[in-house]
Image: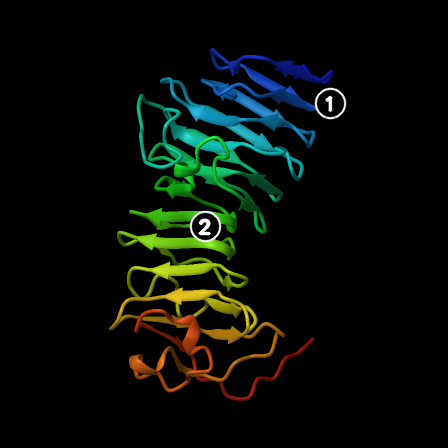
Amino acid sequence: MTTLSGGLFASHSFRIYNGGTLRIREKPVTCLCSAGFNPSSGKAIFEVPGNTFSYMLLGYNNGSTTVEMLVNNVMTNGAVEVGGNGGSAGGANDIGNGTHTLDIHCTTQRCATVAVCPRGVLTGEYPAMLEVYEGRPDNPAKAKYVVIGKVEGGVGFHLCGAGTLTLTNRAFTSCGDLVVSKGVMEFAHNATWLNGTNVTVTGSGTLKLNAGDRFDGKKAVLHLGADADSWKIDIPAGQTQKFDAAFDATGKQLPGGFYGNAASGASRTRYAAHFPHNGVVYVRQRGMQIIFR
């Protein structure tokens, strides 16, 4: 293992080859070129916050890579791509062999954009959170984020910037929380998030589901933003997403029933303006609860 504790400014790409392990501690690293931080094979362990990368790319070559983040806010900015070829921030490019893992443990990390490609794994212990806060400043057309690889453990997503975060083609196994406060968090092509509990839609965020039952209606809990905000839940007509419970912006538990717009036939239309299509949310009818502490 090699330890880097004096900081580093790299004018070109910063890479790890041949299966080595690099431990970064005490002072952060800066790498602003387009190639950014690219551990082609081997392992990097970050123990210091405030590192600055234009890009963090796990993959590209045939070796397997792992990046561990042990403190909050390891990155100050930049794109993250796990298991791709450097062009996947708006797609799902995938080359070579090996597995590429980003393990953020139980921390909160921020990035400008994210792609988890088919050979990529994003993991961490609950309540780990990856915050996606803006599109690629150098390429606004890439304000789209694709998650097609594995998301495991207890890591969740908070989309807090413009653009679309698409979870697609997979039953994701993470039990992490999902939050959308800006932009669009989209479920596509049979993607599900069945182990998670908390789903929050607030601010100007949109939760877009291509069908019902993307979450486990027996345990998933929905948290809604203020009535006056512009958040949306976009579900196609004829589809129902069930939740075990729901809460308004003040933390007050909502009564059970079907929520949607008037055209959907929902019995509860308090949030009608927040349902652009005619799908509905069903909140389980709950009787009296006795809580022991």
Q: Nearer the viewer, mark 2 or mark 1?
A: 1
Position in image of residue 172 (x %, y %): 38, 49
User: Under tag 2, what secondary structure?
Assistant: loop
Give the vertical position of 276 relative to 160 (above or below): below
In this rendering, does residue 105 appear at all? Answer: no
Position in image of residue 125 (x %, y %): 56, 46
Position in image of residue 243 (x %, y %): 43, 72
At x 39%, y 70%, the residue is 217
- The amino acid beneath tag 1 is Lys
Give the vertical position of 151 relative to 241 (above or below): above
Give the vertical position of 222 relative to 50 (above or below): below
Disc sitting over residue 174 in the figure: 2
Position in image of residue 269 (x %, y %): 42, 83
Disc sitting over residue 235 in the figure: none
Instruction: Check the image and tell me how it is coloured.
Output: rainbow
Q: Nearer the viewer, residue 199 or 31?
A: 31
Dot 2 crowding, Cα within 10 Å, few <14, some 14–19, many 20+ = many
Dot 1 crowding, Cα within 10 Å, few <14, some 14–19, many 20+ = some
Between disc 2 and disc 1, whose residue precedes?
1
Image-based side of 52 in relation to 92, left or right: right
Q: Nearer the viewer, residue 148 or 35?
A: 35
Circles 2 and 1: CB distance less than 8 Å? Answer: no
In this rendering, does residue 23 appear at all? Answer: yes
At x 65%, y 38%, the residue is 73
Q: CA distance from mark 2 to mark 1?
A: 32 Å
* Quadrant of the image occupied by residue 289: bottom right
User: What residue is disc 1 on?
Assistant: 27
At x 32%, y 22%, the residue is 97
